[in-house]
Amino acid sequence: MHRKISEADLQAFVDGELDADRVAEIEQYLAAHPQLAERVSDYIEQSRAIRDAVTRDAWTPTVLTMMLVERLARRLRWLRLRSYLGGGALAAAAVAVGWFGHSMAINPGGELAPSHPAFVEEAAEAHATVEALALALNEATDLTASQAADILHSIAGEQVSLDAIADQWPITGALVVPWDDGTAVELIHITPQGEVVSLFVAVPDHPGDVRPTSTRMDTVNMAYWQSNRIAFALSGDLPERELLEIAHRLSSSRL
Amino acid sequence: MGQDDFRNRILHHLPSLHRFAFALLRDRHDAEELVQETILRAIEGAHTWQQERDLRRWLFAIMHNVFVSNMRKHTVRSRFAAEEASMENHSVAPPQIPEVELAQTMRALYELPEEQREALLLVSVEGLSYREAAGILDIPIGTLMSRLARGRGALRNAISRPEEHRLRVVK
């Protein structure tokens, strides 16, 4: 004698959610009820058709998607490390290497020396992301400077007058970019020669003052500075000296 | 656990995420954008992920939330014709199901309410268990089963099948 077979049982049968005994019961029941068997057969066929239809085309992720994957993987690795170390050990490590510890360099004497603040690496990555957007730049940079400032304010509680920057350094738009300490914004400027120069603006955990400084990350020239709670980094295919001049000009503007 | 472990795990789930996104949005470009937005949200909310939690379920849950919150923003376009055209132009057909039937199935799938489509995709395509799928959609298992039943019933009604095929199935 069969237990009652419900619609839920049939669904679970199709989806392999039942134990062997119940499967055997339902198979026996279906053998005696061809109309129901036809319905179940249709459901199974349906699932196969949907699976075939949506899995038929291979997909290759774009460069931007791959870059985002790298960033997520790095973020998860960092969080795992932090959970292994625990708060105390991490604080000790932070004191040992300081705010500049994220990017140590070997000086000519062979000792570890701080090279640049952590946000500079993030800015370089964000700039690479913007470059990867290339043709889609107009679509991606759909924020105005004041909208980007509002986002920073809502995320980090800091008021930054990005309009003041945009007044002296015309931008084509802004976009939100992720970074390890939360969210940052990127203002995009296109030079008359068509070069993309980006200004990364973020609110790091640690306030500080860093004078405009030029550096080079991988193949990108950069100039960065920090004014109390706000960090800035210019990146682009311009000579370091030129970027530094822009950095000086922008850093002296009233934000 | 190696340096690239997280990277490999995410890459492993990427095609599934794109497939899910594509089946929800019916457009490859929009699907890629949904994948990107999902990863962005994951980066921003990475601290909410617990190491012991299944990465795939976490990413799918983010995608579901992004999709639901963006639904109003998305312009609903009729892409059936384009979809059909793309299917007709495709050179590699699956071995057993005729092209026309695939197109018909997809058209019927797209006509389902989003909630039923999501349930079907997670269970039938991604092979998730009821518990996993219900967790991603943040609904009770009973609700998931009811959506599956309604979705399958509607699909079955929508798809007209050749008579000989129907007879063959009955045998």
Image (cartoon, coloured by chain):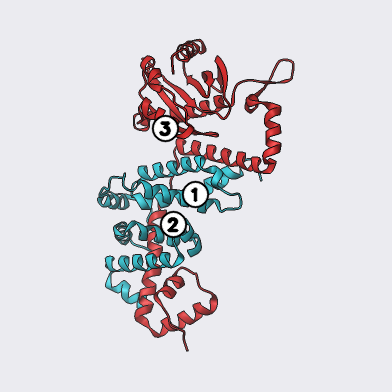
Chain colours: A red, B cyan
- Work out whether residue B91 can be spotted: no
Where B43 sits versus B86, above or below?
above
**Coordinates of residue A120 in the picture (x, y in percent):** 55, 24
* Dot 3 crowding, Cα within 10 Å, few <14, some 14–19, many 20+: some
Do marks 2 and 3 both belong to one polypeptide chain? no
Q: Residue at x 45, y 44 (%)?
A: B38
Closer to viewer: mark 1 or mark 2: 2
Identified by mark 1, the residue type is Leu
Left or right of A192? Residue B134 is right
Q: Are marks 1 and 3 in contact (CB under 8 Å)?
A: no
The crowd level at tag 1 (other Cα within 10 Å; few <14, some 14-19, many 20+) is: many
Quarter location, residue B74: top left
Label 2: chain letter: B
Image vertical order of residue B30 relative to residue A95, above or below: below
Q: Nearer the viewer, mark 1 or mark 3?
A: 3
Residues beneath discs 1 and 3 located on the same chain? no
Pinpoint the chain carrying mark 3: A
Label located before the other in sequence (1 or 2): 1
User: Mark 1 vs mark 2: same chain?
Assistant: yes
| Residue topped by disc 2 | B137
Report how far apart the C-alphas of labels 1 and 3 lie in the structure: 24 Å
Name the residue beneath numbered marker 3.
A151
Asked if residue B102 is positioned above or below residue A122 in the image, the reply reads below
Q: Amino acid at mark 2?
A: Leu
Q: Position of residue B7 (x, y in %)?
A: 57, 42
What label sits on residue B59 in the rendered view? Answer: 1
Secondary structure type for disc 2: helix
